[in-house]
Image (cartoon, rainbow, N blue to C red):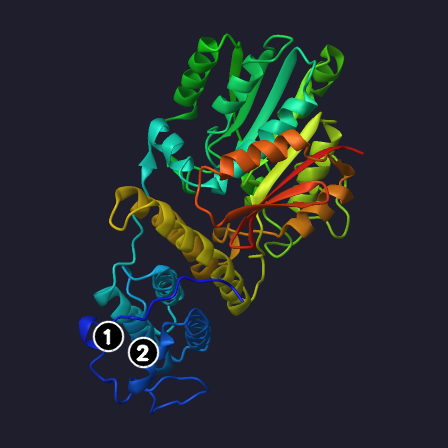
Amino acid sequence: MMQFTETPPQPLHQITPFSIPTMNKNQIHRARPWPGFPTSKGLGSFGDANCMEQLLVHCANAIESNDATLAQQILWVLNNIAPPDGDSNQRLTCAFLRALIVRAAKNGTCKMLAAMANAHCNLSIDIHAFSVIELASFVDLTPWHRFGFTAANAAILEAVEGYSVIHIVDLSLTHCMQIPTLIDAIANRLEGPPLLKLTVAGGATEDIPPMLDLSYEELGSKLVNFARSRNVMLEFRVVPSTYADGFSSLIEQLRVQHLVYAESGEALVINCHMMLHYIPEETLSPLPNANSNPYSFEPSSTSSLRTMFLKALRGLDPTIVVLVDEDADLTSNNLVCRLRSAFNYLWIPYDTVDTFLPQGSKQRQWYEADICWKIENVIAHEGLQRVERLEPKSRWVQRMRNANFRGFSFGEDAVSEVKTMLDEHAAGWGLKKEEDDLVLTWKGHNVVFATAWVPA
């Protein structure tokens, strides 16, 4: 069983429920009884996370079948047992409840429900735009990103040893926050610092949190100045490119320069930090035809943009590819399957936040708003709008092998550095080594994986 932080829900008289004039707590179980539906006397026992998950599933099914009466009944229960300022389970459930209401309102189903929601619930998410200093401090609060930074940098440093020119293509959700630490490490190489080239995909995640309050050109200037302060020469380049087409324009520019890389003996590093799961996968759209294929090879009958992207990377013959992402599966076309997967993964950030951010702090609001955004995207949206399509480590490992990469094992130095970093955080964080890969855990549950690859 998962380990949750559980406290009893507040008594009903202390919470203001949605105003539903046609029902009260004595009517809640009368119209459509189903197994496990609580009576008014039984609400106190529904603070259990498993019960909350079941209620959310029943609510999702009611919304999908356009059963407004049943959906409203379940919403009444959820609203009473999951206040937005409750414990971690309650806040998690509240976020899913809000996402289900957004789905109902967005799809035009359950019109009574949508009208009620709009009247009584603030559906907007206030996403904070970070300054560079704020974002650097923010990602340092938890190992969620720092784990990947630490593991990836250790693998990169090992792979590029001896190279005088290193070209890093940084596909990162965190806007190059990994790079300053890498610059520091490179500056201290025994053979002296190399020329560092850094290429990023401009505009790739401008609508996905965490968001930055300055342009990539301004960010690049800051990084160049930081590198100069460490006696490292850095060349920064932005290539307008998006995950929606598998970063095709970035791949094309890299391919054009590929012969130059090969002739100059330049190390090519592809650093993918929680970005590749935004590239569309099989469930999103039919296979593109040859005329619309942004890559130069013919896709097989099982190709997706993810498959094509990884094969295009292999064609660049990189020195190393590092792939870090969240270890969950949110690709199902079935809403209930996605809801269960997301609920049984996203309890982790809610549980961890209680260990490092006080209730009511701005940073905690920013942190939980980002999780709410992810939950809404997974639950409320479909098609091209549903971009949060996480895949588990096992599937990415198979994708990399299919693209003709082989695993590059993290050495003892990398393991030691990750362990040292984890010592700075709460006791619930842990590290597992699975074959060549590293996995960050929270209370024994997989959170984020780090893998490194070289051409086979």
Q: Is the residue 2 above or below the residue 70 in the image?
A: above
| Residue at image coords 26%, 89% | 26
Q: Secondary structure at mark 1?
A: loop
Q: Is the residue 67 above or below the residue 302 in the image?
A: below
| Residue at image coords 51%, 63% | 2
Where is residue 263 shown, x and y percent of the image? 75, 12
Foreground of the two, 121 or 357? 357
Quadrant that contains the C terminus: top right
| Residue at image coords 62%, 38% | 323
Q: Quadrant of residue 100?
A: bottom left
Where is residue 102 shown, x and y percent of the image? 36, 62
The local crowd at label 2, few if under 14, some if 14 to 19, many if 20 or more residues have their Cα within 10 Å, is: some
Amino acid at the residue labelled 2: Gly
Where is residue 402 shown, x and y percent of the image? 77, 44
Tags 2 and 1 touching, CB below 8 Å: yes
Is 372 situated left or right of 61 in this image?
A: left
Where is residue 29 shown, x and y percent of the image? 34, 88
Quadrant that contains the N terminus: bottom right
Is 357 situated left or right of 159 in this image?
A: left
Residue designated by label 1: 11
Residue designated by label 2: 44
The local crowd at label 1, few if under 14, some if 14 to 19, many if 20 or more residues have their Cα within 10 Å, is: few
Residue 348 can be seen in this image: yes
